[in-house]
Image: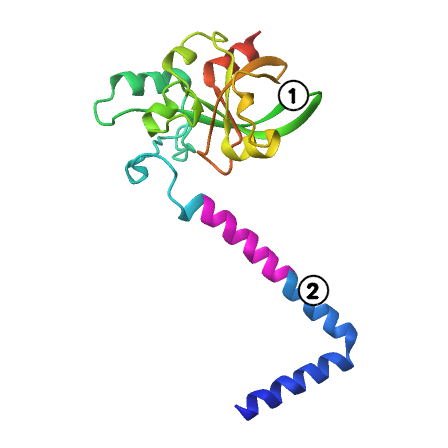
Amino acid sequence: MAAVIQDVRYALRTLLTTPAFTIVVVLTLALGIGANTAIFSLTDQVLLRLLPVKAPEQLVVLDGPGAFQGRTFNNGTFSYPMYRDFRDQQRVFDGVIARVPLPLTVMTGGQSERVSGELVTGNYFDVLGVRAQIGRTFTPDDDRTPGGHPVVVLSHNYWMRRFAGDPGVLNRTITIIYKSMKIILNRNLSNIWEVFLCLHLLIFIFCM
């Protein structure tokens, strides 16, 4: 024990006598600890924690051959008609959903900001077993007609950050990609995605 105390004293004395070296050491340690903390936090949220959905251990990600001959990596991407065929003709799963991450611009209260969004199918929340915290979730009817139901789902984190947890945001209108949409729900589904839109709504906007 005495040897350890002597080593600590010697190290402190060395650092105090060489301030430039001490600053470099402290900054290096701070950067290393900060980077490792950030990486672990992201890994914990994305890979280690189970999704807050019903039976997350039963979720399966579909993949298939690439679009070109000889290409086997497809990144889990399918066309919407192919997804629809999977959904209607499969007899293995309780349900099949589709999702596409997409950065979005939200305008409300005279201010605009860039947020992380997801385009999802109308059965998305139902298949995942996620219920509304307030309001309601998407339904297949919301995703049946392009542009038919301009509604948006907010994540719990975005609701707290942007609207300070005000329950009065339900049925309030905000603008996303130059289209007015009604808020129907806030839900703590993800720490990554902040707003959710129906796939058919964006198909309508892009084809206008």
- At a point 56% along the width and 12% down the height, the residue shown is 205
Using the rendered view, name the quadrant where residue 131 is placed: top left
* Residue 181 visible within the image: yes
Image coordinates for residue 114, horizontal then vertical, percent? 64, 29
Q: Is mark 1 on a helix, strand or loop?
A: strand
The vertical placement of 55 against 205, above or below, is below
Which residue sits furthest bottom?
2
Image coordinates for residue 37, horizontal then vertical, percent? 55, 56
The vertical placement of 1 against 160, above or below, is below
Q: How far apart are marks 2 and 1 (CA)?
A: 41 Å
**Is 113 positioned to the left or the right of 68 in the image?**
right
Residue bearing mark 2: 27
- Taking depth in this image into account, of 119 and 6 the one nearest to the observer is 6
Q: What element carries label 2?
A: helix
- At a point 46% along the width and 49% down the height, the residue shown is 44
Image coordinates for residue 76, horizontal then vertical, percent? 40, 31
Q: Write down the region rendered in magenta.
A: 31-45
- At a point 56% along the width and 52% down the height, the residue shown is 38
Lower position in the chain sequence, tag 2 or tag 1: 2
Density class for disc 2 (Cα within 10 Å; few <14, some 14-19, many ≥20) is: few
**Is 29 positioned to the left or the right of 203 in the image?**
right
Using the rendered view, name the quadrant where residue 178 is placed: top right
Residue bearing mark 1: 108
**Mark 1: which amino acid?**
Thr
The vertical placement of 23 against 48, above or below, is below
Q: Nearer the viewer, mark 2 or mark 1?
A: 1
Q: Main secondary structure of the magenta part?
A: helix
- Is residue 149 magenta-colored? no
Which residue sits furthest left?
91
Density class for disc 1 (Cα within 10 Å; few <14, some 14-19, many ≥20) is: some
